Image (spheres, coloured by chain):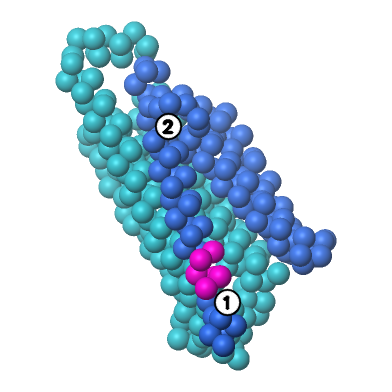
Chain colours: A cyan, B blue
């Protein structure tokens, strides 16, 4: 495998330039993720300021179910690992395993979104919607923004599954898979901040 | 192969073992975080400190094992961008909290 790639690079300067382009794209996407982090920091700051104003309504202790949240967190953590294993499979050119890995990652991400929507639905149905208090406004905005990111990540996974099926593991597909994996791991990273600051500190 | 792939985040010299190690560490830290809150094993003050330490540690685990950031020269700019963003994040959050929680006393 080593020699194979070296040969391609030696015979084809376009391939080299392409490799450099992929690296630049990766860096560019990293910059996007960092700007996304700035967006989340504004929402975290908002939560820190108005997240403790309950307006006489229920607080985290009454509303949050920690075992439920732990299961939700596990869905996202597992999906991060399955995506990692998918990337290993991709490096080994195992197309079928890449597709299986993406499907499993998608289902785990879907499980996370379903649990989050179920929680939101329960809160709103009980009259604890975003308009109830400053705490709930900040809660729905921060957690909802993260959930929206995961939702778009799921769409991206579907797109990549179809691309891997149709095009195979071409350079372009690999490059996009790389960025999707960064996006997915990044969302799991932000979730650590969310469950620590919003849920655990709230209930404590 | 190494030359090309080392430079790419998320796919440089990655192994199943690396992801499993990262997963076990992340799982342990998550259990510690939830355990601190659900068992009331330590005082509130210690639990808050413990939560932040566990959260930062888990973020570092994710950055290292999942996003493959390290101190190699190929990662220099990624790490630099992250460090700058962390600075911004600190200014935004700490600055906002500082200004707004001391608003009353400073308006007197």
The chain ID associated with circle 1 is: B
Q: Residue at x 22, y 26 (%)?
A: A18
Determine whether B4 is above or below A110 in the image. above
Q: How many marks?
A: 2
Q: Which residue is drawn at 28% across and 47% down?
A: A159
Q: In this view, does B68 lie to the left or right of A24?
A: right
Q: What stretch is highlighted in magenta?
A: B94-99
Residue at the spot of label 1 = B101
Q: What element carries label 2?
A: helix
Name the mark on residue A22. none
Q: Is residue B23 left or right of residue A37?
A: right
Seen from the viewer's position, the closer of residues B36 and A121 is B36
Residue A52 at x, y percent in the picture: 59, 79
* Residue farthest bottom in this picture: A56
Q: In this view, does A86 lie to the left or right of B105?
A: left
Q: Residue at x 48, y 60 (%)?
A: B91
Residue B95 at x, y percent in the picture: 51, 66
Camera sees residue A145: yes
Residue A55 at x, y percent in the picture: 56, 89
Residue at the spot of label 2 = B75
Seen from the viewer's position, the closer of residues A23 and A116 is A23
Q: Is residue B101 left or right of residue B7?
A: right
**Residue B66 painted magenta:** no
């Amino acid at each position: 495998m080593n020699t194979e790639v070296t040969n391609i690079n030696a015979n084809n300067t376009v391939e080299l330039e392409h490799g450099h382009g992929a690296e630049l794209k990766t860096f560019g996407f990293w910059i996007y993720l960092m700007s996304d982090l700035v967006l989340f920091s504004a929402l975290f700051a908002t939560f820190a300021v108005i997240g403790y104003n309950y307006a006489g309504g229920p607080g985290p202790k009454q509303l949050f179910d920690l075992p439920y949240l732990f299961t939700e967190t596990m869905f996202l953590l597992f999906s991060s690992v399955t995506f990692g294993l998918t990337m290993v499979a991709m490096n080994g050119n195992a197309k079928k395993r890449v597709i299986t890995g993406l499907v499993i990652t998608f289902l785990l991400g879907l499980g996370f979104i379903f649990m989050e929507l179920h929680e939101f639905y329960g809160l709103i149905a009980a009259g604890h919607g975003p308009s109830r208090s400053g705490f709930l406004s900040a809660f729905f905005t921060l957690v909802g923004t993260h959930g929206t990111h995961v939702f778009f990540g799921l769409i991206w996974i579907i797109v990549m599954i179809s691309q891997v099926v149709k095009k195979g593991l071409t350079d372009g597909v690999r490059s996009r898979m790389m960025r999707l994996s960064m996006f997915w791991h990044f969302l799991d990273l932000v979730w650590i901040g969310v469950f620590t600051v919003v849920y655990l500190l709230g209930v404590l | 192969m190494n030359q090309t792939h080392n430079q790419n985040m998320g796919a440089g010299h990655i192994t199943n073992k690396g992801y499993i190690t990262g997963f076990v560490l992340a799982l342990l830290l998550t259990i510690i975080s939830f355990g601190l809150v659900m068992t009331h094993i330590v005082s509130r003050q210690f639990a808050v400190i413990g939560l932040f330490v566990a959260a930062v540690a888990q973020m570092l685990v994710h950055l290292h094992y999942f996003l493959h950031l390290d101190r190699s020269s190929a990662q220099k700019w990624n790490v630099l961008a992250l460090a700058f963003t962390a600075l911004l994040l600190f200014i935004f959050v700490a600055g906002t909290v500082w200004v707004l929680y001391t608003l009353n006393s400073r308006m007197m």
